[in-house]
Amino acid sequence: PQFLRQDFRQDLPLADILKTYPLRGWQVALGELLAPTAVLTGIQWFLLILVVGLFAQPAVSRLGWSCWLGMGFGAALIIPMLNLITLQIPNAATLLFPAWFQATKGGGQGIEVMGQRLIFMIGQLIVFVVALVPAVALFAGVFFLVKWLLGMAIAIPLASIAAALVLGAEAAAGVALLGWLFER
């Protein structure tokens, strides 16, 4: 997410043009986030397919094919939502603090910019952890309940679906927040 800046971080200087489009703020925010989310998700799904295909033999001997494929399916469900949330955090920071954002990848230099980037990094990490807490809690609850009732091969995908739904709801709220920030 830090390298794919085809979103508000790149387009904020063009905000006056973006505001002339006959779109609501949340629609512009969603449009700004979908391209980098799709690129990141595509790369990560490709790598996930490689991991599931190439490294399956040692894992299958311990877990079994059904658990291994369940973990791959669960990861494939959660990855797009995590990408969307990790892209929303720096975009929200850009819209909240427009004077602080860096228009280029290189940005400024010096001790002041290093401190600013450190503050943003710590803030992004805290917001990301807070966003993950409900999804992790629901994943753990569903996982242990379903594992106890039906087994681990079914528990992983069902828990991943539950976590993806929570992350999707958070991402939808984040898009609405970004739209409100953009309109403001």
Image (cartoon, rainbow, N blue to C red):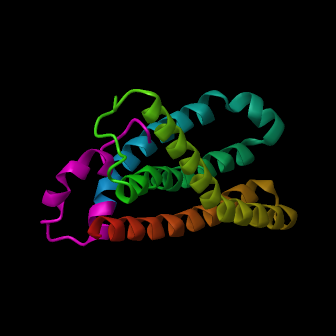
Residue located 61% across and 52% down the image = 126
Quarter-wise, where is residue 138 in the image? bottom right
Q: Residue at x 48, y 36 (%)?
A: 46
In what quadrant of the picture does the N terminus appear?
top left
Question: In which image quadrant can residue 52 be found?
Answer: top right
Classify residue 61 as left or right of residue 116.
Answer: right
Is 95 colored magenta in this rendering?
no
Q: Is residue 148 above or below residue 104?
A: below
Could you say which is closer to the camera, residue 75 or residue 98? 98
The number of numbered badges drawn on the structure is 0
Name the residue located 48 percent from the left edge and 64 percent from the top edge.
171
Q: Is residue 23 left or right of residue 8?
A: left
Q: Horizontal and vertical percent for residue 11?
A: 24, 49
166 lies left or right of 5: right
Looking at the image, residue 6 sits to the left or right of residue 42; the answer is left
Q: Quadrant of the C terminus?
A: bottom left
The front one of 25 and 107 is 107
144 up-or-down from 62: above or below:
below
| Residue 20 on image: x %, y % | 12, 66
Judge whether residue 132 can be spotted in this image. yes
Q: Residue furthest right?
A: 148
Range shown magenta: 1-29
Please state the horizontal and vertical placement of residue 37, each as a whole percent of the image.
Answer: 40, 49
135 and 103: which is toward the camera: 103
Q: Residue at x 67, y 50 (%)?
A: 70
Q: Position of residue 125 (x, y in %)?
A: 59, 48
